[in-house]
Amino acid sequence: MNYTLARLQTTQDKIIQGKPWYAYFTFRNDKGEMQMVKRKAGINRFKTVKERKREGQILVQEINNLLLQGWNPFKTLDQQQNNYSTLNLLELMQELYKTKIDTSAYRDRTKSHYRHHISILKGYLEKSNLQSIFPEQFTSAMADAYSDYLLSVKQYKGRSHNNQIQGMKTFFNMFKKKKIVSENPFDEIKDKPTESSTHHPFSESQRNTLREYFIDNEHRMYMFVQFVYYCFIRPNELMQLQVKHINFKEKTIHIPGN
């Protein structure tokens, strides 16, 4: 629980000069500590104990209603749209994925990447006992430790590491846009070097040898290679190609976006 319900603080049921009444409660602040919050809201303008008790209890009820609805006294109204302020880091990422990414025009593969980003971070937070951390509590030092985790524990190489960090930057930029956080803790994480593989094309003699073998022994493979070589169609797309995508009259091949 991130808060305690409000109560009314009185001066022993008496009106004493210079001793104000107030409603008080505690709420977990950005440092993860339970901090006392006081609200007076004009109840001390009333002169009798009966009036002040009545107005004080109304104030307490209003505060408790707000708390139960997800109000955070340490955030502005802009930060609390859609009750985002009540969600921890993982819950917020899942909520924004559901409302901003899964409902968008992103391709299924891209959506899968974002789900993967959330899953990997979840594993790290659980391993580090940080699964209940709030976005504003996730520091640049934690982001750096997460980068090390990807390299050492997950054994990610340059490209996989960089993709995962870029996913985190994207989520935290969404948080910044909604004023949930003021800084992106992943901004200082630099891309790791990626190894560029060297391609060695077949010689003319090797191509002829393969072509002759495929024609005589693997005709379907021969046709497959011809599509790749002459039409610049990637193998994964070629495997999903259907006859309906080929217009024999116009001599064209249509590759759908999906």
Image (cartoon, rainbow, N blue to C red):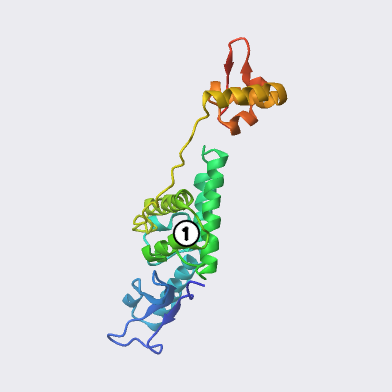
* Residue, disc 1: 151
| Above/below status of 139 relative to 26 | above
Q: Residues within 10 Å of mark 1 (few under 14, many from 20)?
A: some
Callout count: 1
Q: Position of residue 123 (x, y in %)?
A: 55, 62
Q: Nearer the viewer, residue 241 or 65?
A: 241
What residue appears at the point 40 percent right and 90 percent down from the top-left corner? 12
Residue positioned most to the bottom: 12
The amino acid on which the numbered mark 1 sits, given as a three-letter code, is: Leu
Q: Nearer the viewer, residue 39 or 127?
A: 127
Determine the secondary structure under disc 1: helix
Is 93 placed left or right of 78 in the picture? Answer: right
Residue positioned most to the right: 217
Residue positioned most to the left: 18
Q: Position of residue 140 (x, y in %)?
A: 37, 63
Is 182 placed left or right of 209 in the picture? Answer: left
What residue appears at the point 45 percent right and 73 percent down from the top-left corner? 60
| Residue 255 visible (yes or no) | no
Residue positioned most to the front: 205
Q: Position of residue 17 (x, y in %)?
A: 28, 86
What residue appears at the point 39 percent right and 69 percent down from the top-left corner? 30
What residue appears at the point 49 percent right and 46 percent down from the top-left corner? 100
Q: Position of residue 119 (x, y in %)?
A: 56, 56
| Residue 2 visible (yes or no) | yes
| Above/below status of 6 relative to 176 | below
The quarter of the displayed image where residue 258 is located: top right
